[in-house]
Image (cartoon, rainbow, N blue to C red):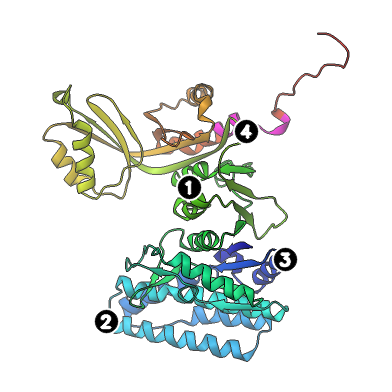
């Protein structure tokens, strides 16, 4: 059994759904369970409709209807599906009408609203799969056993979900049915629709895989897997054959947009491998994410960067030799709800980084009572993911590149996972620095030094 999750771009229209059908047929003997996102930009269109309803008191879902009805027509699907979809359109329109009257969008209503994208997507895709002779059934996640708390917008699945999911899906598969399940959504104990937050659809897939003890999770996106750098910055970025869970989590946290760390947790606990593939290029091998490391671990796996970062330097000579300085600093940040990224410390000082959208005024006021605080905006984190057992070699090469580029490193930190080294530079320096680092660590093949070979039977 495998779990196959297809993102929004993979099911964005009739042509893409046909391609997905071909991928599924090629692996049908592995007993797949499908998890789908909403089609293309559907969720954005739904939220735009909600915004219009609130600001103008006007309800329009024409853009949403057009995309889905056009896809149904192009796939040649029947009237029964059209009727089911029109019922969903009516339900969506009624909800938006209510929003237009109240001129507000609560967390609970927002989750109900955005659920329509996934609900429409699975019904169209399942109908198409039936048209090519696969016994597919569209299933809303709550019917498959997904039960969450009531944290609308970022709900957490309850412990009993795993047992419910496995029991339901084993019985469905035993009937010879191909399950097509909505990603991203669930219901709380009161029957309210919830969403699972960032990486929610991928999380749905990995939760199912863990519950059903699947042999593999496939995450189908529009890239060839995890790349050695952001292709928008580095034109010759190349796919990474394999990474560990820790490496993938660090890449995602520091800017890579492939798989959210939260979504990997169920597989990390069970040891189920995750394969990231490209639905636009299914022949590409993709990237395999799994536990442990191999003997041939490269010097580095990949580079990533995160811009628009704040660097905060805090120092207090009055705290020299006094216990509790760091505890007091972190307590202030926690009490004000400010999340910290990187940290570097000494006896009486600490440097840390934050996302630029966080409010620092209250924290600065509290810390000023016993420490000097300097806030520097317009910074970026550049992160190297690799074999930190060879950190001296990595740093020597990386700092050599920084020196050549005239870049002054302002802070450095090594993650507790022992797979990343990160440093702070000015925002405007990061793009060019990432390009230079990539060229240094991943030179074009024609520039790679060739090893000298010796003739057999001859002594040097």
Give the residue pinned by disc 2. Answer: 102
> What is the number of the mark on residue 442?
4
> What is the number of the mark on residue 252?
1
Q: Residue at x 14, y 41 (%)?
A: 365
The answer to the question of whether label 1 and label 2 lie on touching residues, with beta carbons closer than 8 A, is: no
Q: CA distance from mark 3 to mark 1?
A: 32 Å
Is disc 2 surrounded by few (<14), some (14 to 19) or many (20+) residues within 10 Å?
few
**Residue 49 percent across, percent down from the top left:** 41, 76
**Residue 168 percent across, percent down from the top left:** 53, 73
Q: Residue at x 40, y 62 (%)?
A: 197
Q: Is residue 257 visible?
A: no
The answer to the question of whether label 3 and label 2 lie on touching residues, with beta carbons closer than 8 A, is: no
Q: Name the outermost residue toward the left.
A: 369
Say whether disc 4 or disc 2 marks the residue closer to the N-terminus.
2
> What is the number of the mark on residue 29?
3
**Residue 73 drawn above or below residue 221:** below
The answer to the question of whether label 4 and label 1 lie on touching residues, with beta carbons closer than 8 A, is: no
User: Magenta stretch?
Assistant: 437-446
SS at circle 3: helix
**Residue 321 percent across, percent down from the top left:** 17, 22
Q: Residue at x 63, y 74 (%)?
A: 174
Say whether disc 1 or disc 2 marks the residue closer to the N-terminus.
2
Say whether disc 3 or disc 1 marks the residue closer to the N-terminus.
3
Q: Which is more foreground, mark 3 or mark 1? A: 3
Between 68 and 344, the one nearer to me in the picture:
344
SS at circle 1: helix
User: Can you say which quadrant of the picture contains the N terminus?
Assistant: bottom right
The answer to the question of whether label 3 and label 1 lie on touching residues, with beta carbons closer than 8 A, is: no
Q: Is residue 438 magenta?
A: yes
């Amino acid at each position: 059994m495998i779990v196959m999750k297809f993102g929004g771009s993979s099911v964005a229209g009739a042509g893409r759904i046909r391609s997905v059908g071909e991928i599924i047929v090629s692996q049908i003997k592995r007993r797949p369970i499908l998890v789908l996102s909403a089609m293309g930009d559907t969720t954005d269109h739904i939220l735009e409709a909600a915004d219009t309803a609130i600001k103008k008191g006007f309800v329009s879902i024409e853009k949403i209807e057009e995309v889905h009805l056009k896809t149904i027509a192009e796939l040649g699907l029947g009237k029964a599906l059209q009727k089911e979809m029109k019922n969903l359109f009516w339900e969506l329109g009624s909800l938006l009408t209510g929003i237009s009257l109240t001129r507000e969008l609560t967390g609970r209503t927002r989750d109900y609203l955005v659920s329509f994208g996934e609900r429409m997507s699975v019904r169209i895709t399942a109908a198409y799969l039936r048209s090519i002779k696969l016994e597919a059934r569209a299933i809303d996640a709550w019917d498959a056993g997904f039960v969450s708390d009531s944290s609308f917008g970022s709900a957490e699945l309850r412990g009993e979900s795993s047992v419910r999911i496995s029991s339901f899906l084993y019985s469905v598969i035993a009937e010879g049915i191909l399950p097509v399940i909505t990603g991203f959504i669930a219901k709380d104990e009161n029957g309210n629709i919830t969403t699972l937050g960032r990486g929610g659809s991928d999380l749905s897939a990995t939760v199912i895989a863990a519950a059903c003890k699947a042999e593999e999770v496939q995450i189908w996106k529009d890239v060839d897997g995890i790349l050695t750098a952001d292709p928008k910055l580095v034109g010759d970025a190349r796919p990474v054959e394999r990474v560990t869970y820790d490496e993938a989590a660090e890449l995602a946290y520091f800017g890579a947009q492939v798989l959210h760390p939260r979504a990997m947790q169920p597989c990390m606990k069970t040891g189920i491998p995750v394969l990231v593939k490209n639905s636009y290029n299914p022949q590409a091998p993709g990237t395999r994410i799994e536990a442990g490391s191999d003997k041939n671990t490269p010097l580095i796996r990949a580079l990533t960067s995160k811009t628009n970062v704040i660097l905060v330097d805090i120092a207090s000579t009055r705290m020299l030799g006094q216990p509790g300085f760091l505890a007091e600093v972190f307590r202030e940040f926690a009490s004000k709800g400010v999340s910290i990224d990187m940290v570097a410390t000494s006896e009486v000082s600490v440097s840390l980084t934050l996302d630029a959208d966080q409010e620092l005024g209250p924290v600065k006021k509290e810390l000023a009572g016993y420490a000097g605080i300097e806030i520097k905006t317009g910074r970026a984190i550049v992160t190297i993911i690799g074999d930190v057992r060879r950190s001296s070699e990595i740093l020597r090469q990386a700092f050599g590149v920084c020196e050549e580029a005239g870049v002054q490193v302002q802070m450095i930190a090594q993650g507790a996972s022992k797979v990343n080294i990160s440093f702070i530079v000015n925002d405007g320096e990061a793009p060019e620095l990432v390009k230079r680092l990539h060229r240094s660590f991943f030179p074009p093949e024609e520039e790679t030094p060739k090893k000298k070979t010796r003739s057999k039977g001859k002594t040097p």
